[in-house]
Each structure stands twice: as structure tokens, then as C-alpha cells.
Image (spheres, helix red, strand yellow):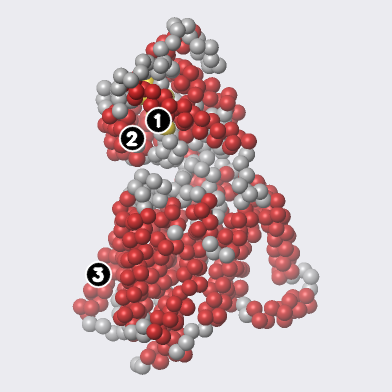
Amino acid sequence: MNINKRLENRRYITGFDGIRTIAVIGVILYHLFPNIMHGGYLGVPIFFAVSGYLITDLLRQEWLQNETIDVKGFYIRRMKRLYPGLLTMLVLSSAYIVFFQKDLLNNLRSVFASSVLYYNNWWQIFKGFSYFDRFATQSPFTHIWSLAVEAQNYLVWPLLFIALKKYVKHSGKIFGLIMGTAIISGLLMAFLYTPGADPTRVYYGTDTRLFSILLGSGLAFVWPTYRLKEEVPAKARNLLNGVGIASLIVLLLSFLFLADRFSFVYYGGMFIVSIFATILVAVTAHPGADMNRWLTNPVFTWIGKRSYGIYLYQFPVMIFYEAKITNLSDHVLLHSIIELALILGISELSYRYIEKPLGKFYYQYTWFAIKDFFKKPWVTTAKITAVFCTIVSVFAVYALAIAPSNEVTADQQQLQKTIEENKKKAEERKEAEKAKNEGKTADSTEQSTAPPEINVDLNAEELKKAKTMEITAFGDSVILDAAAGLQDIFPKLIVDGEVGRQLYESAPAIQKLDKDKLLKENVLVGLGTNGSFTEAQFDEFMAAIGSKRNVYWINVRVPTRRWQNEVNTMLENMKKKYKNLTVIDWYGYSNAHDEWFYEDRVHPNVDGQVKYSSFIAKEIMK
């Protein structure tokens, strides 16, 4: 069969829906169960690889048939594919926010504009937002960053394709150039990544994520669908199947084990995953292999065709739903099932009534459609739908009109100020202690024997005892929030706190404190607010502290996060394992008192800081 005949008979590769299904399931489970699906975020480079291959393969076919590319037509097709679903999600979400979650109005106009114009990834980078901060108030539009990366590629790639076909011509040379650019992108990710720091810059950046799309695009120059033959020798079929299965297994294992905190991810790990995703795409595309058939079934086809809508609505559903749940941790599985049902249901409606019909609509006939619309009776599905859409759009416009920019509430200002002041004082105290250890100064904490007059729920005897105790407090922003109160009770207290701190990255910091002689006989730990941890990570942390020190660990109150109970259960189990560990039940003591907390329901407010410091002190001195 000649090339033109093959182009005319090009097939829809149903297995790609299967690949999309695997990718979108990975992403959603990563957000719902991050401690099980550690690497589910790697579904995104799989999407990128599929997209790069399909777009470039279609461009190659168009070039072979016409010796040119209808760039305008390409852009229109992409807009018809992407914009209806995106705009609908943005409008519905904006209307919901103005009625039910006004705390998310902040910067809504900028979010809307950056999403519609597809520069959201760079907007988030320049605003300093973090994709990995599990505690901070998350935006229902955080995930739009990946759509922006793809859309930026769509904008540039047809023009580059034309230039490459005109001036480089040879497919092998073009493949080499694309692979070289992909490698540069991967190296740029490694170069810009800083171990131990937030990796959002390299995770969001178009320059550092483009390699996944480029690998798919490069594949289309050496593995175009119109050249792939259905009849291949048995050995070739077995080889293809074996490679395809191996690549799928690697991707699934990566979903389970390749956590986003590993430096390996940014030092080539994501590039390697993208290679295996591209290999899976190649095998699935080949009609001589069985992978396409294996990845084709009614469930995968259904999810795959709706994967765009599923991806679009996952974050809005999760953010809006979980904001209304008073204690998410008590029924994580139940709430996750409800969220999944909502995501799938809304995505089905989006696909059936928005994406599919508007994707096929010929916009040059808009005027005729409008005239036909007004000729119909008033009580019709079309007109009822139009009225509903108009009302929702008005509310969305109202939300955009009243949305503040970079607003910080009074509570947020107070919390930020408290944390900043306490961190500064904590650093000064550490420096003074280091100077004392080196013999440069006397102990600045030596005061009169009279107990200080401070606002705490402790008697004079308890305050007197606390005055002589040497303690190192190590933790996250909650420890920093209450540091001043703890310091008043324990004048010899050393505080080492960092906003967003996680247990898995804390052992080196403990070792440094020990080296600087700042790790005292009693260690107060406040970790778990920002995420859970494994027993192995806990063991590593406790080993860094040492078995001869007394460890007092404050459990967590994070009612809006799904890991609260998991962290507290782990601490109770570890209490049985470590004889030098005492768990302070702050959760049990404070959970019924929302009035002790700022609006995030986690950080103690001014009154709550007194309760927190007093309770912790009493527990330590038992």
C-alpha cells in the first residue's frame, strides 16, 4: 500500500485512550492518596509524550499530503479542543467561589487571565507559589500549569515544524535536533534544581519540562504511524510486546515509588520516565504489536476520552469539597470515593454537553445558529441551558470584578508577623547559645530566682521548674507560631523551626544542631503538620536525636488535611517502640476548641498560643 493510501486509511489508535487513563488515574490518586501513589504526578509527562507524538504525527501527515501546514487551521482545532472545557471550568469555579468560598477570590482575575492565555505556569513561578506545599491553602486552578506548558508548545511547534521541514528536511537530522533539544531541557532541569529547596521552578517551567513533549515529537519522525505495518514477523511482535510490557511496568512502579521529594527525579529521573512513556507510545502505536489491543477496553476508552475533563475538574472538586468537610481525616476513603464520583460525573457532563459538541461546532455558522436558536419555542432544553449559562456567567464576571489582588487578611498578617518575629528571636537565641558554648559569653538566660510574670496557665512551682530545664524545640510553622510563649516558660529553650518543614528532610538539621551543641537533653518535636511519614523516616530521625535524649513529640491538629489521623496513629505506634518518646496529645486537648486557632484551624491564635504553651509545658514537666 502506498503512502497516500495509508494516509487516507489512517486509524484511530484506541490504546492511546488506555495510556491517557493510566496517566490521569496516576495524577488523581497522587492528589487523593499521596502516601500510596508517591509518583502519580508522573502521569503528566506521560500526557506530554502522547501529545507530542500525536500532534507531530498529524503534522507530518498533513505535510506529506499538502507540502505545507495550515497553521491557522491547526490553531483553530487546538482552541476548539481545549477552550470549551477550560472556559467552562473557569466560569463555573468562579461562580462557585463568589458564593461559597470567598477566601479563594484573591488574585482570581490574574488566575483567570493566565489560564485563558496559557502562561499560568510562569505566573505561578513568579508569584512564588508552591506545587508541593500540602498545607497552604491550595488553589482550585493550580493544575492549569501543565495545560499552559502544552499550549505554549502548540503555539510554537507548527512554525518550527515548517522551518525544520524546509531547511533541514531529512527526518533523521530533524530527529537528532529534537533529541538534542530534549536533552538540553533535561539538563536544564538538573542544573536549576537545588536539593532540599522547593522544586516548583523546575517542575513548572516550560524550559525544564519540554523534554517530555519533545521525546514524543521526535518519535513521530522515526516512527510515523503511516509507515508502521500490521504484518510483522513473530519475533518482532514478541520483541515489541516485551518492550511495551516492560515500559508499562516501569511506569507503574514509578507511580508507586518515585516520590516528588527525591533528588533523582530532577537529576534525570523524570527524563528516564519520559523515555519509557515514549517507548510505550511507540509500541501502542504499532499495529503489529498487541499493546494497543491490551490497552483497549470499555473502561479505558470511557476514561481516556474524558481524561481532559477529568484532569480539569480534579482540583476544583477536591478543593471545594474538602473545604466543607469538618474533619477529613476521619473518613478519608469515603470522602475520596465521593470526590472521585463527583469528578467523573462532572467530567461526563462536560464531555457530553461542552467539549464534544463545541469541538465539532463550525464557528463560521454562528450567526445562523443564533437565528435558529431564537426561532425555537421558549421552553426548550437549549434555551433553559442558555439561561442557566448566562446566569452563571454573570456571577463569574461579578467574582472577577470584586476579586482582590494579593490580599492578606488580618489573621494572615498577624500569623506571618508572629512567625517572622519568633524566627528572628530563635536565630538570635541560637547564636547566643553557640557563643556561650565557645566560651565567648556568659549564659544570658541566668536571671533572678523569682519566676517571670507571664500569661500562662502554670503555677509558680511549675514555672520555677521550667526555668532550669534545657530544651531544644524542633519543628515547623506551628512551633514557630508558639515559640515566644514557650520561650517565656523555658528561658533556656533553643528553637529551630522552618515553615513547611517535613520529617523526611529533617535528620540532617538535627545532626547539625547536635554538632553545634544546640541539641539539648530534652527535645520537643512538632512535625507532621505538612504531611505524614513512614516508619523508616521516623527511625532515621530518632537515630539522629539519639536514644539518650528525652523526646517529647506534639501530635497534630490538621482537620482540613487527610494525613492528620495517619500522623497521630503513627506517633502512638512509635511510642511503643521508643522508650525515650513521649507523645503530647495536643490534638485531643484542642480539637474541640476552634476558637483557639486562626482561620486555617491549625496555627494557634493569640489565645491559643497561651493554651498551647501551657499544655506543652505541663506535659513535659509531668
Q: Where is residue 279 in the image (x, y as percent from the top left)?
A: 31, 70
Mark found first going from the N terminus, 2 or 3 = 3
Question: Residue at 47% across / 61% down in the picture?
Answer: 146
Label annotation for residue 509: 2
Mark found first going from the N terminus, 1 or 3 = 3
Could you classify mark 2 by the number of other residues whose Cα lies within 10 Å: few (under 14), some (14-19), or many (20 or more)?
some
Q: Is residue 471 positioned above or below 82 on the image?
A: above
Q: Quadrant of the N terminus?
A: bottom left
Mark found first going from the N terminus, 2 or 1 = 1
Q: What element carries label 3?
A: helix
Q: Is residue 382 positioned above or below 94 on the image?
A: below
Q: Where is residue 15 in the image (x, y as percent from the top left)?
A: 39, 72
Under mark 1, the amino acid is Asp
542 to the left or right of 417: left
Question: Residue at 43% across / 54% down in the picture?
Answer: 201
Could you classify mark 3 by the number of other residues whose Cα lies within 10 Å: few (under 14), some (14-19), or many (20 or more)?
some
Query: What whole-number distance in Å separates the C-alpha atoms at marks 1 and 3?
Result: 52 Å
Q: Which of marks 1 and 3 is in front?
A: 1
Residue holding disc 1: 496
Under mark 3, the amino acid is Gly
Could you classify mark 1 by the number of other residues whose Cα lies within 10 Å: few (under 14), some (14-19), or many (20 or more)?
many
Residue 352 in view (yes/no): no
Q: Is residue 269 positioned above or below 436 on the image?
A: below
Under mark 2, the amino acid is Ala
Q: Where is residue 359 in the image (x, y as percent from the top left)?
A: 58, 74
Q: Is residue 559 positioned above or below 177 on the image?
A: above
Mark 2 touching mark 1, by CB under 8 A?
A: yes
Question: Residue at 42% across / 29% down in the picture?
Answer: 427
Query: What whole-number distance in Å separates the C-alpha atoms at marks 2 and 1?
Result: 9 Å
Residue holding disc 3: 242
Q: Is mark 2 on a helix, strand or loop?
A: helix
Question: Residue at 53% across / 56% down in the picture?
Answer: 123
